[in-house]
Every structure is written in C-alpha cells, then in structure tokens.
Amino acid sequence: MIGKSGLVSGNIYAQKLIVSGKLSGLIECEVVEILPLGHINGKIISSELVIERKGIFIGESKIKQDKSPTTPLAHHAPISHQAQDTQDTKPQSPKSQTPKLQAQ
C-alpha cells in the first residue's frame, strides 16, 4: 500500500496494490486499486483495475492474461509459436492443418 503522503518512483510487482499517494512506473499486479486522490502515472498490467472517484491514472493499462505468480517481465523467456514440417512436403487437406513436429 502507498499511503496518502507516499511518493514512489519505480517498478512494482505484487499480488495487490492499493494507492492513495503518488506512484510513477511499471506496475504488474493481480489487483490494482487507486483510492480517492491516489495518482498513478505509468503502465499497469493487471487482472483487475479499480479507480475510485477522484483517483487519477495517466498512462497505459493492459489485462493480465494468466493467474500465475507475478514475476518481473524481464524474467519471462521468449515463446515461439512456429512449427516447421521438414519431412512431409505434400499439401494437407483443410481438415488436417495441424503442423507436425519433428522429434530432436
């Protein structure tokens, strides 16, 4: 929680964040609440965002897709969704559009 007289500049990773003071930075939490006179300037990634009357949010917000434990974004490995079929070169029928993976 960031209290009424609190002033934070930086990144926050938590399950739940309640802001009544001022915060500037990247926030990745399951739930973010901005209370009256609370102020966030930055980017929010969360499953739930609540801005109460007279709360201020300036920036960008994105919906957090998964419910996995919150970790810094820099620790996530890149994911590749490409699969190549190097053995079967004949055209597939529309019913069998699933790519075949080659065991390594």
Image (cartoon, rainbow, N blue to C red):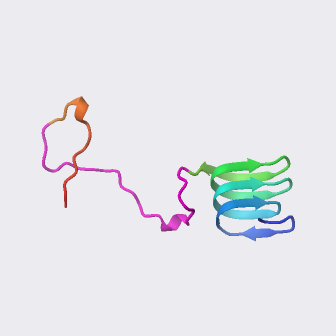
**Residue 53: image location, x then y, percent:** 84, 46
Q: Quadrant of the N terminus?
A: bottom right
Residue drawn at (13%, 49%), measured in percent from left and top?
Answer: 87
Residue drawn at (23%, 35%), measured in percent from left and top?
Answer: 96
Residue 46 magenta: no
Residue farthest along the top direction in this orientation: 94
Rendering quarter of residue 10: bottom right
**Residue 68: image location, x then y, percent:** 53, 58
Residue drawn at (22%, 46%), measured in percent from left and top?
Answer: 100
Rendering quarter of residue 99: top left
**Residue 84: image location, x then y, percent:** 23, 50
Residue 76 magenta: yes
- Report whether 26 appears left or right of 21: left
Chief SS of the magenta region? loop
Tell me where the magenta segment starts and ends, as one range.
65-90
**Residue 69: image location, x then y, percent:** 55, 62
Q: How many marks?
A: 0
Residue drawn at (31%, 50%), measured in percent from left and top?
Answer: 82
Q: Quadrant of the C terminus?
A: bottom left
Instruction: Between residue 24 and residue 65, name the one nearer to us.
Output: 65
- Report whether 78 appears left or right of 36: left
Using the image, determine if residue 68 lies above or below residue 8: above
Using the image, determine if residue 23 lies above or below residue 48: below
Using the image, determine if residue 58 lies above or below residue 69: above
